[in-house]
Image (cartoon, grey):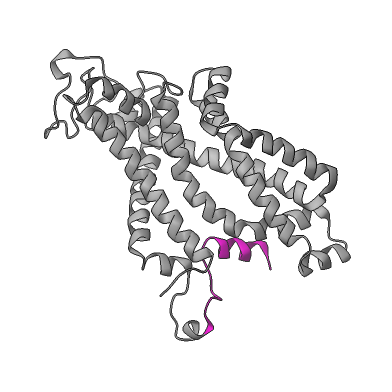
Amino acid sequence: MKPLSILKKALGFRDDVDAVRAAKGENLSTWYYLLHKKQAVVGIAIIAMFLAWSTVEGIMQLLGGYTRDPSLGWLLLPHNPISSPSLTTSLLPPSLRYPMGTNFEGQDIFSRLLYAAPKDAFAAFVVVLSAVALGSILGIVAGYYGGWMDEILMRITDAFLAFPGLVLAIALSVLIGPGFSSVLIALTVIWWPVYARLFRGQTLTLKYRGFVEISRLFGVSEAKVLFRHIFMNALDPVIAYMALDFGTVILTYSTLAFLGIGIQPPYPEWGSMASNGLSFFPSAWWYTFFPSLTILLVVIGFILFGDSFQDVISGRVVD
């Protein structure tokens, strides 16, 4: 099977699922099944809004940095999310002017949540894709060659898995130093071992399959065998797992921010906003409630979609 066909199948463009229904001209893609599952539709709607806004706002912030005009970053927002503290607007409850109230510094919580969204989306995609890239290389090499190479790589993987992920991420972030980049590196370090295990398991089941053996007999280079026949065929279950993982990364990233690790003030982050609001709870309940609710909704969106997507990929769909 060609790599493009395998990737299309993994992403949901499945034109060979049911020959009878195909003859009737019905859409048999994964998306057909997903759009007929209520929980998947809810998840897709949440993810689509989150990614659409993060993309638009992220572009505006990049333009602001490129033109050295930070105000472009909040051009689409109701208020300046990093304005100077103002006692006159401090801890105002939700209203028409401030739909989610204001924080202790008098800044609009709604604007700060929107301003922070691109960072959370970027963190999720960078961490998951980096973990897949690193984990696939180590996992496929270990599973394909076996022997001492498998033993060494898997013992290294086990060493990373032995540490509680959050504790290791905190230690690495502190060791590297404060900042957004250090959090991304720390999260990637704790995320790749899982994907290394997944790809190794898939490799062990694929390397003795007929199409791999035939490719070797015909002198196909090992690099092409590893990518074209092992990696591309191992993507199916891994993509389903990735769909679930995006939400988990956002939750972990927000947890680190809640603990004060990552992006530093005055720039907002969902986790740190929830943490700062705890000091004023319950009198100013909106301060911590809305950031926490935002994290919860986005994570639930990815879980609903990922769980449904995994059911379809694994063939557990019931019409």
The boundaries of the magenta stretch are: 1-19
Q: Residue at x 19, y 26 (%)?
A: 282
Q: What residue is rendered at 37% in x and 18% in y? A: 265
Give residue 5's quadrant in the image.
bottom right
Can residue 142 be seen in this snapshot?
Answer: yes
Q: In the rendering, at what x and y percent does residue 89 appear?
A: 15, 19
Q: Residue furthest left?
A: 96
Residue at point 50%, 42% (across, down): 125
The question of residue 214 being in magenta is answered with: no
Q: Nearer the viewer, residue 223 or 271?
A: 271
**Number of numbered discs present?**
0
130 left or right, relative to 300: right
Q: Residue at x 30, y 35 (%)?
A: 292
User: Up-down: is 250 above or below 21?
Assistant: above
Residue 67 in the image: x percent, y percent?
41, 25
Residue toward you, 188 or 45: 188
- Is 45 left, or right, of 156 in this rendering? left
